[in-house]
Image (cartoon, helix red, strand yellow):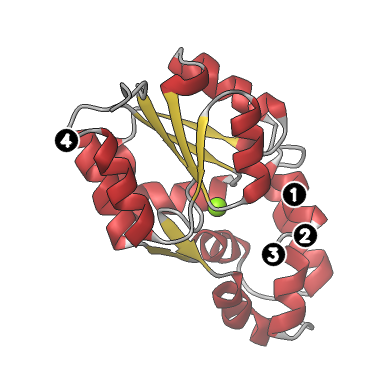
Amino acid sequence: MKPNPTKAVVFDLGKVLLDFDYGLLARRVAPRCRLTAEEFRREVDQSPLLHRYETGLIDDQGFLDAVIGRSGFEGDRDELGRLFGDIFTPIPEMVDLHGRLVALGIPTYVFSNTNAFAIRHIRESYPFYSGFTGEILSFEVRSMKPDAGIYVALENLSGLRGPDLLYIDDRPENVEAGTARGWQAWLHSDPSVTVPRVLDLFR
Ligand SMILES: [Mg+2]
């Protein structure tokens, strides 16, 4: 067997460790908006507005202003911020995998296109998050996967390069950008495939 070069495991969050659904948010707020739930979801989910926010080009208040302006949301703005973060459901097999790596003493990193409302909620709600060695968040480094800047930020934080890093993400373009830097980058879709594949490396 070839020696395993992995010195750290880099995790995407969304659809890897946590499932998310902007439909949940949309259904909660739509009764207080001039948009239907589906229209509201389209305003945020993978929208140019969310992309600007998650790149750190607008701040929390600027983002809420824009959402309220577009949707006519009539409720409390702090509540809207909280609801924005509360769209996640943990994926137990993957959270368990993370815990096993931590127990083995393997450094782990969060590597996520995300925003402050989401991270605040995740930190408060999911104890596994405190087990990470470090985190690189798009809105803090002002770069979103698959742009090179955020990958450089992870390399600098970890002090690791190329095949030292095992990276797991559900989006092909993000995985390709990792592969292009020489990382071991794996496309994730099914925990029943990813979990044994990762654990095999550390047997
Ligand atoms: Mg993802």
Kindly report the distance in space between the C-alpha atoms of the residues bearing marks 3 and 4.
35 Å
Q: CA distance from mark 2 to mark 4?
A: 38 Å
Instruction: Identify the amino acid type marked 1.
Output: His
Q: Are marks 1 and 2 in contact (CB under 8 Å)?
A: yes
Residue 39 in picture, x, y percent from top left: 77, 79
Circle 2/circle 3 CB separation < 8 Å: yes
Q: At which x and y percent is residue 132?
A: 33, 34
Locate residue 101: give its quadrant. Answer: top left
Residue identifier under label 4: 103
Q: Position of residue 184 (x, y in %)?
A: 49, 31
- Whether tag 3 and tag 1 are in contact, CB under 8 A, the answer is no
Q: Amino acid at mark 2?
A: Ser
Q: Is residue 177 left or right of residue 198?
A: right
**Which residue is denoted by mark 1 in the rendering?**
51
Q: Residue at x 77, y 59 (%)?
A: 47
Mark 2 and mark 3: Cα distance apart in space: 5 Å
Horizontal relation, residue 59 to residue 2: left or right: right
Q: State the image coordinates of residue 26 (x, y, percent, origin top left).
A: 63, 77
Give the mark nearest the N terminus, 3 or 4.
3
Residue depicted at 59% across the width and 65% down the height = 80
How far apart are the two marked residues, 3 and 1, measured between alpha carbons? 9 Å
Residue under numbered circle 3: 45
Please, which residue is most extreme toward the front here?
Answer: 1
Which of discs 2 and 4 lies nearer the camera? The answer is 4
Q: Identify the amino acid type marked 4.
A: Ala
Check disc 2 and report the residue beneath it: 47
Mark 1 is surrounded, within 10 Å at the Cα level, by few (under 14), some (14 to 19) or many (20 or more) other residues, namely many
